[in-house]
Amino acid sequence: MRKKIVAGNWKMNTSCPEGVELAKAVVAKSTEVPANVGLIIAPPFTHLCCVSEITEGSKVELSAQNCADHTSGAFTGEVAAPMLTSVGCQWTILGHSERRQYYGETDEKLVVKTKLALEAGLGVILCVGENLDEREAGKHFEVCENQIKNVLYNFTAEDMKKIVVAYEPVWAIGTGKTATAEQAEEIHAHIRKVLADKFGAQVADDTTILYGGSCKPSNAKELFAQPDIDGGLIGGAALKADDFIQIALSF
Ligand code: 13P
């Protein structure tokens, strides 16, 4: 039985003291969330060390938003996967569309990053999703399928136990425009089929696939009611503890 997860991607928001307060509020309210729903927060790198002291011993798990494609050395400004585990991180997001769009993240790089993250003991939340032009051209299934194949087909069924997929249509991120539950469901079902083709039905069935893109308390219930939507990767609404927990109570 795959796990339901609600993950908060804070992106480049909050000062460290603000982040600590937000984490405290999320941890305090996390006791309301049922045991079968996992909670993850992904603050900026600078906050991880302080925030891990708050999440430790709670049901809230800690994620980074990215990691380097090397393990150490002369790579100024980068943060390696083993550094993340050294401050108590259990996860990293990889391949977010903002990284793909603004920082030249390619599928090839994501193979390396995913490998290093898994080697360091991190779970990976791998993001895929089409942009508006691709959707309007009817290429959304193909784009997501290729992103999944290019990255995850390099891994094993065993690796898949530590990998969560997040479908985030770029046109729905931060725009207030949510994909309809049907639009999201058909891509989620397709992603699960693409995983089944490589890893078999059982692995595909056990893989958590999250939806991200203007997910909020008012639409989470309808999205999470879909058979292949196992939770959400939340941006804006994760910056308010009440909204974030409300979303986690929407299954
Ligand atoms: P919003 O929820 O702000 O649309 O962001 C979604 C997202 O990109 C999460 O990674």
Image (tube, grey):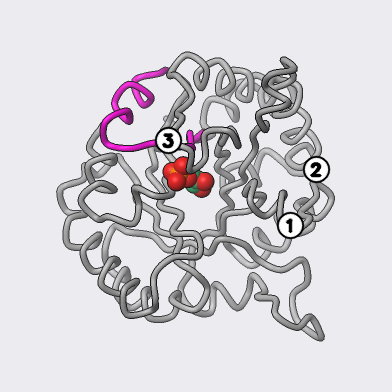
In this view of the protein, which residue sits in the foreground, 210 or 17?
17
* Disc 1 target residue: 115
Q: Name the N-terminal-most of marks 3 and 1.
A: 1
First to last magenta residue range? 208-227
What residue is at 71 percent from the left and 55 percent from the top? 102
Picture quadrant where residue 66 is located: bottom right
Helix, strand or loop at label 3? It is loop
The foreground one among 225 and 38 is: 225
Residues at marks 1 and 2 touching, judged by CB atoms closer than 8 Å:
yes
Picture coordinates of residue 237, whole percent (x, y): 34, 47
* Mark closer to the chain start, 2 or 3: 2
Residue shown at 73%/25% (left/top)? 134
Quadrant the N terminus occupies: top left
Q: Amino acid at mark 2?
A: Asn
- Judged left or right of residue 194, residue 8 is left
What amino acid is found at the position of numbered circle 3 in the picture? Gly
Label 2: few (<14), some or many (≥20) within 10 Å? few
Which label number is shown at residue 152? none
Residue sitting nearer the eye, 127 or 114:
127
Instruction: Give the residue at x 23% y 69%.
Output: 24
Q: Amino acid at mark 1?
A: Lys
Q: CA distance from mark 3 to mark 1?
A: 34 Å
**Residue of label 3:** 176
Label 3 beta carbon within 8 A of ligand 1: yes
Query: Which of labels 3 and 1 is toward the front?
Result: 3
Q: CA distance from mark 1 to mark 2?
A: 9 Å
**From the Cβ of disc 2, is ligand 1 less than 8 Å away?**
no
Query: Which element is circle 2 on?
Result: loop
Position of residue 65 relative to residue 86, above or below, is above
Residue designated by label 2: 154
> Residue 62, percent across and down?
43, 63
Asked whether 209 falls inside the magenta stretch, the response is yes
